[in-house]
Amino acid sequence: IKEVAIAGALAMMAGICGRQYNVSGGSGLNLYIVLLAASGMGKEAAKTGVDRLFHAMSETNPGTSVFLGPRTVSGPALEKAVSEHNPCFVTFVSEIGVRLQQMLAKRNGDPLMKAAWLGIATAAQRGRRYQGAFHSKKDDRTKDIVFPAVTIFGESTQQEYYKAISGDSFADGFVPRFLVVTHQGTEIQPLNQHMGMPP
């Protein structure tokens, strides 16, 4: 599926190059990508392809693995990953529609994760910094992060994604940060003539 391949390629390159260049206005190249397609269409192929490419690169350039970020389950965990792992990486969120429903729920939502996603995206400009957090437990503390450039790639069905979206999500600037890539088809075409070949 072309949309899956293109979205995955954008995520990978943004994860590597997010801090190296700026667009007009000073913003970095990091992206928050949501890939929407029907169930069974192979949305997970984007992550599989990126994993295979990073694996192939790491055989001759082991340092490139730092641009493939960890999976984070909370806002403080994401902040710690950016502070200690690398300020520039791509991370994948499976079933992002369900995750956003949980995050944005009016009751029992996850405001810390939303705040981390929004804050890190806002700080993704040369010269800006994402303020560290001081916790009572020393292990939970994070340092200031200068010019973070985290790329988030999530896949979902249209139904689950749009269940999470409301007017409030647009008003606070959260949802407008997402680049939504949609595949409307219901059949997978054999477009990749080199499927299964090592990168």
Image: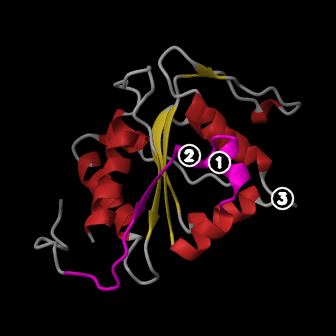
* Residue 181 located within the stretch drawn in magenta: yes
Could you say where residue 113 lies in the image, as x and y percent from the top left?
Answer: 71, 47
Disc 1/disc 2 C-alpha distance (Å): 6 Å
SS at badge 1:
helix
Earlier sequence position, callout 3 versus callout 2: 3
Could you say where residue 139 lies in the image, as x and y percent from the top left?
Answer: 76, 34
Callout 3 amino acid: Lys
User: Do the numbered discs 1 and 2 sit on residues whose CB atoms are within 8 Å?
Assistant: yes
The residue carrying mark 3 is 106
Disc 1/disc 3 C-alpha distance (Å): 15 Å
Badge 2 local density, few (<14 within 10 Å), some, or many (20+)? few
- Give the colour scheme shown: secondary structure
Could you say where residue 143 lies in the image, as x and y percent from the top left?
Answer: 67, 23
The residue carrying mark 1 is 170
Residue at 65%, 48% in the rendered image: 170
Highlighted magenta segment, given as a residue range = 165-189
Earlier sequence position, callout 1 versus callout 2: 1
